[in-house]
Image (cartoon, rainbow, N blue to C red):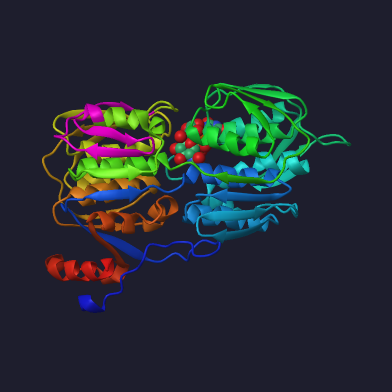
């Protein structure tokens, strides 16, 4: 195909409603080693928005969420809520949600199996309706991801839970008010999802629920803030003991989602890996403390320009060791981007993944680009190399796909990334944002890849797209 004829595909975005965009078979081509410059606007946090959308099921009045990113995962959560009887309307980054009339349906398995976060509907639906059926989400590319902690928490609050034919059926026994009962729940592990499920369910329970060894992630605090704005009585979020005093009902709310700390971290790494100075905002820099600490250790400076902005000033990259941990430890969602960065650092690094058991799908792909990484059990050993070389690679999960984009930005020559549906789940407008900074990349149909020696023609074409 003549290059000029080749269609450039915009990254899938939700337009004016909540529905997910149609999947397109396409690849992302990146011509590496362009230096980047400028400011990046960080979108609302995907994981906060997903939990808060589930939390909106608690609300029998109008619910307005602002700063909601336009992503495939958000679209899928919207479809699940619609299937449960919720009315949704999206205007720009605002989502109007009306969950007055829930129809008591089971969330469709096809959607739940694609979006694990849809399981977060379990707690709010049980608390509000007294009975819920929701399919088990199943495994995913990064691990088995059981839901035992969610289920045990709800059982401790008096719910009867049966798992039959792959569906969780939970109900509150007895007649009358059908409210869960507050109690003390110790989580064996500070699971983000289980903390969210129990905290949401407890908002409408009778009496006090104490969640011990709770997750402390900023997304938990954001969900708690959303619930409080609806009249819930929650304290201690952001610490490992969350106390919820149940109320009989919640009310209308207008709430902005926090900035996405993982997207922000990914752009900080983009600055470091391309040796480019970048300004990112809005951010909550406290949410990025472990990421900033590791960038500092590696020789980069990260400066707070003001309360909401961070500037990365890259330096000569040095190796470091990383262990992923629950917040405030180093986030597992930043592990893959940092592995990409460490491939180009001087010296040897060890990265231990302790949160998920199978989260090194990016390693063989990075090795195809000339990286020197070996994985032993849950540890990736990275020997820094002076340069990566562009290659065809396959994204295996969301953060692995971000790692490949980052590596492609730094690599010599062309990198072609397949499996873009992973990337589209979690990064709003990533390609446009990178192009605005000066990166050379575009999305084309899988059968229309650009030949290696056509770089100058592509540059012309990209220049036209940018106008
Ligand atoms: C959330 C985030 C994800 C992030 C993760 C850890 C969303 C939509 N996703 O996922 O991006 O990587 O937190 O920060 O918010 N576990 C159990 N039993 C359970 C629940 C969890 O054993 O009932 C285990 C999991 O298998 C995993 C670990 O706990 O090994 C952490 O999982 P969890 O914190 O629950 O992550 P998610 O909420 O699934």
Which quadrant is the N terminus positioned in? bottom left
Horizontal side, residue 100 vs residue 438: left or right: right
153 relative to 394, above or below: above
Q: Is residue 366 visible?
A: yes
Give how far across and how far down residue 240 sits, in percent. Answer: 54, 21
Name the image quarter holding residue 268: top left
312 relative to 236, above or below: below
Front residue of this view, candidates 252 and 300: 252
Q: Is residue 377 visible?
A: no
Front residue of this view, candidates 375 and 253: 253
What residue sits 43% from the left and 31% below the top?
Answer: 355
Give how far across and how far down residue 368 sits, in percent. Answer: 20, 48
Name the image quarter holding residue 213: top right
262 relative to 423, above or below: above
Give how far across and how far down residue 372 sits, in percent. Answer: 18, 38
Q: Is residue 357 magenta?
A: no
Give how far across and how far down residue 146 sits, in percent. Answer: 55, 36
Q: Is residue 316 magenta?
A: yes
Horizontal side, residue 146 vs residue 198: left or right: left
Q: Which residues are magenta?
A: 296-324
What residue sits 55% from the left and 36% below the top?
Answer: 193
Extreme residue toward the right, this view = 176
Horizontal side, residue 198 vs residue 72: left or right: right
What residue sits 48% from the left and 46% below the top?
Answer: 46
Horizontal side, residue 5 vs residue 289: left or right: left
361 relative to 299, above or below: below
């Amino acid at each position: 195909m003549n290059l000029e004829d080749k269609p450039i595909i915009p990254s899938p975005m939700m337009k004016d409603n909540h529905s997910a965009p149609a999947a397109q078979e396409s690849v992302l081509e990146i011509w590496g080693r362009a230096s980047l410059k400028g400011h990046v606007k960080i979108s609302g946090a995907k994981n906060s928005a997903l939990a808060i959308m589930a939390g909106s099921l608690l609300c029998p009045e109008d619910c307005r969420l602002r700063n909601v990113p336009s992503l495939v995962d958000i679209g899928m959560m919207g479809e699940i809520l619609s299937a449960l009887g919720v009315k949704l309307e999206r205007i720009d980054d605002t989502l109007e949600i009306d969950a007055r009339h829930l129809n008591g349906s089971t969330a469709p398995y096809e959607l739940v199996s694609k979006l694990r976060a849809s399981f977060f509907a379990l707690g709010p639906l049980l608390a509000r309706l007294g009975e819920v059926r929701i399919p088990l989400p199943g495994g995913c590319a990064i691990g088995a991801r059981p839901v035992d902690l969610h289920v045990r928490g709800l059982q401790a609050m008096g719910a009867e839970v049966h798992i039959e034919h792959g569906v969780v059926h939970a109900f509150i026994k007895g007649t009358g008010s059908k409210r869960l009962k507050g109690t003390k729940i110790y989580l064996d592990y500070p699971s983000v999802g289980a903390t969210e499920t129990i905290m949401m369910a407890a908002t409408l329970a009778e009496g006090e629920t104490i969640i011990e060894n709770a997750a402390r992630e900023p997304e938990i605090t954001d969900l708690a803030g959303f619930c409080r704005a609806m009249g819930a009585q929650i304290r201690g979020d952001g610490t490992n003991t969350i106390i919820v005093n149940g109320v009989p009902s919640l009310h209308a709310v207008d709430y902005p989602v926090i900035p996405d700390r993982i997207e922000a971290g990914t752009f900080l790494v983009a600055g470091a890996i391309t040796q480019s100075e970048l300004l990112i905002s809005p951010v909550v820099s406290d949410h990025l403390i472990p990421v900033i600490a590791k960038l500092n250790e590696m020789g980069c400076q990260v400066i707070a320009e003001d309360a909401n902005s961070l500037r990365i000033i890259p330096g000569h990259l040095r190796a470091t060791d990383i262990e992923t941990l629950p917040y405030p430890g180093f986030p597992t969602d930043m592990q893959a981007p940092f592995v990409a960065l460490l491939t180009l650092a001087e010296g040897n690094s060890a990265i231990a993944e302790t949160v998920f058991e199978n989260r090194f799908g990016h390693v063989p792909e990075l090795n195809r680009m000339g990286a020197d990484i070996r994985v032993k059990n849950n540890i990736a050993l990275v020997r820094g190399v002076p340069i990566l070389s562009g290659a065809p690679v396959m994204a295996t999960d969301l953060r692995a796909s971000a790692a490949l984009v980052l590596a492609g930005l730094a690599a010599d020559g062309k990198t072609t990334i397949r499996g873009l549906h992973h990337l589209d789940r979690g990064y709003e407008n990533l390609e446009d944002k990178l192009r605005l900074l000066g990166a050379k990349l575009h999305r084309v149909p899988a059968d229309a890849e650009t030949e290696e020696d056509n770089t100058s023609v592509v540059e012309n074409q990209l220049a036209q797209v940018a106008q």
